[in-house]
Amino acid sequence: MTHPASYQRARSAEAKQARETAILEAARRLGRERGIRDVTLTNIAAEVGMHKSALLRYFETREQIFLELTAEGWREWSAELRAQLRTCVEGDPARVANAFASTLAARPMFCDLLAQAPLNLERNVSLEAVRTFKLVTLREVDLIGAEVHRLLGLDQQQVLDLVSAATGMAGALWQMASPGPLLRDLYADDPRLGHAVVEVEPRLRRILAAFLAGTTT
């Protein structure tokens, strides 16, 4: 972390881009360590070595920073998912479900962002920031859809339902799987609450396999 006293305002386009990249990387580190909900704009500014007011020259809000990371997560997840789908056998819903579940479960911070985006991140940014984010997701859904259509013959609406179910459930299940130390101890100490401890990947795989079994019959 850079000390705030060493901060100097970026003067060139290249310096501005480097500063924005540093801010995003700081938010990514903190999000992984603490969870998205517990990271403030002040935390991010301190991690970069900037004052909060200086950081606002680069991003309009804390939510815009994390919305950009969510868009980045969509691109990275989509690329990995499509690579796995290209290895699947045509007409095998179980392998498609496994590809979705495994690639999402391998990205816990992205799952956290998926849960936070509609609840918080899209609600405190400009309309243009939301538009930009939505266009990124639509493009990645189209790319994913081409692979799913090739394998299972799903139409556009069915693909949208599949991706919405996968990403929505991944976000929800990750939140359930990450209750914090006090709740985790409670669940471990009381056998009646054992069902509250969730493993994201196997449950998501079962849900998506059932969805695809019903959709492809």
Image (cartoon, rainbow, N blue to C red):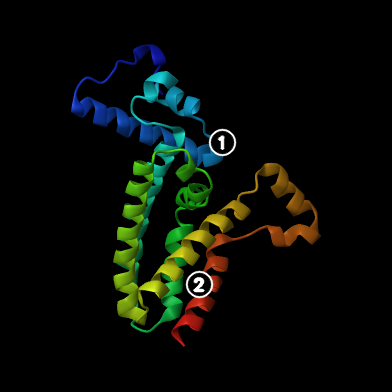
Q: Earlier in the sequence, mark 2 or mark 1?
A: 1
- Residue 7: image quadrant is top left
In what element is the residue under mark 1? helix
Identify residue type, mark 2: Leu
**Mark count:** 2
Residue 61 in the image: state x and y as whole percent: 43, 32
| Residue at (33% x, 28% y) in the render | 58
- Residue 81: image quadrant is bottom left
Position of residue 188 relative to residue 162, above or below, is above
Characterize the local packing of mark 2: few (<14), some (14-19) or many (20 or more) Cα atoms within 10 angstroms. many
Q: How far apart are marks 2 and 1 (CA)?
A: 30 Å
- Residue 125: image quadrant is top left
Q: Is 54 left or right of 177, judged from the image as shown?
A: left
Residue 148 in the image: state x and y as whole percent: 35, 74
Characterize the local packing of mark 1: few (<14), some (14-19) or many (20 or more) Cα atoms within 10 angstroms. few
In what element is the residue under mark 2? helix
Identify residue type, mark 1: Asp
Residue 27 in the image: state x and y as whole percent: 43, 35
Q: Is 116 left or right of 190, judged from the image as shown?
A: left
Which residue matches tag 2?
Answer: 208
Which residue matches tag 1?
Answer: 38
Q: Which disc, if any, is residue 196? A: none
Residue 50 visible in the snapshot:
no
Q: Which residue lies furthest to the bottom in this view?
A: 217
Instruction: State the quadrant of the N terminus.
Output: top left
Between 194 and 131, which is closer to the camera in this rendering?
131
Position of residue 66 relative to residue 207, above or below, is above
| Residue at (22% x, 19% y) in the render | 11
Q: Is 139 left or right of 115, judged from the image as shown?
A: left
Residue 84 visible in the snapshot:
yes
